[in-house]
Amino acid sequence: MDISGVHVFADADDYALAVGIVPARFVVTAPGRFWAHMARLVLPHLDLLVLTESQPRTAYIALAPERLHVTYSLRLNTPMFCSGVGLQRDDIWFHSCHDRFHQRVSGPAHWGLVSLDPIHFAAAVQALTGRSLTVPKIGGLFRPPHARVKRLFRLHGAAARFGEQKSKLVLNPEVARAIEHDLIECLISCLVPDHEFGDLGFWRHRTEVLGCLEAFLEANPARAAPTDELATVLGISQRTLHSYCADCLGVSPGRYLRLRRLKLVRQALLSAPPNPTIVAAVARDYGFLEAGRFAATYQAAFGELPSATLYRAQARQTGAGFDESQG
């Protein structure tokens, strides 16, 4: 979806794909129906997103290695966490190349993401500051003066609205160049080393451990592994695992695994062929052996019964209508 404009999502998986997150790694952690709004502005050397989400969630994000990325929260009353580090007012996270991390929000979120061409950005840094660009090896947290951050956020929002309301003007090279120049200049003023808040290397172990957890879950998607087994596999204590998950995921290890497996059940049902017995079979495939308890757990997570998900998927495949009162 590399075009400027506004996109609205009623499905968490569609939204995750649009942002560039593998759907299985995007987990909504509170009951209720998810929706999201994306305003996007695509410029020659910069891709800017303003993202609004309705529900608490956690996401394991693997950033594109050929781009630089910057993230920040645009809503102060809903904390955002990167690798368990809470972003406070005026905080900006400058991501390393090949960065993989957990990002979570504890409520309705409003946040910004900027993706940059590293060659163009490095040249701009050199031209404006006389310094060489230093990309953090792990991930750098910056806390610039409030006035600079305020200007960055204002430019970010204005650029997104411009892409929404006057997307055809963005095709004008002079207009695109002017917007891009202002945004990059403002970013550089916020990311010079003088404003780096601290070395986040001490979060390396937690990030690496939970990265190993994600690798284990992807290799064993149907396993309802107990916490003691997970801790043994990861080489840490159960207490440490609970602490890491609370900070980075916002939920316990057991709840995270259950939500991951429920999500995989839903994905399977949405692509399943017409078959009234498929719900029970798919549930068993992902370790849910008690039908009644599974249906209640699924409805609490997604706001509908698994049979409603299946009917909706089949109606979409056949082109028939779907009455949501069935859920």
Image (cartoon, grey):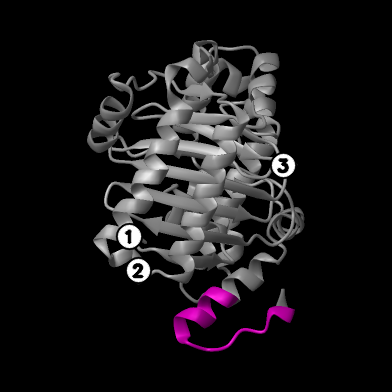
Q: Nearer the viewer, mark 1 or mark 3?
A: 1
Say what amino acid the circle numbered 3 marks: Thr
Q: Which residues are magenta?
A: 312-325
Residue 129, picture quadrant: top left
For label 2, the residue is 169
Residue 166, picture quadrant: bottom left
- Tag 3 near tag 2, CB within 8 Å: no
Place of residue 30 in the rendered image (x, y in percent of width and height, measured from the top left): 73, 49
| Separation of marks 1 and 2 at Cα, in angstroms | 7 Å
Place of residue 156 in the rendered image (x, y in percent of width and height, measured from the top left): 50, 49
Mark 1: give few (<14), some (14-19) or many (20+) Cα within 10 Å.
few
Work out whether residue 93 can be spotted: yes
Work out whether residue 271 can be spotted: no
Above/below status of 131 relative to 148: above
- Of residue 65 and residue 323, the one placed in the foreground of this image is 65
Find out whether residue 324 is within the magenta segment: yes
Place of residue 157 in the rendered image (x, y in percent of width and height, measured from the top left): 54, 53
- Tag 1 near tag 2, CB within 8 Å: yes
Q: Residue at x 63, y 62 (%)?
A: 35
Above/below status of 1 relative to 289: below
| SS for callout 1 | helix
Say what amino acid the circle numbered 1 marks: Val
Q: Residue at x 26, y 29 (%)?
A: 127
For label 3, the residue is 78
* Quadrant of the snapshot with the C terminus: bottom right
How many numbered circles does the render carry?
3
User: Along the polypeptide, which appears first: circle 3 or circle 2?
Assistant: 3
- Of residue 230 and residue 213, the one placed in the foreground of this image is 213
For label 1, the residue is 175
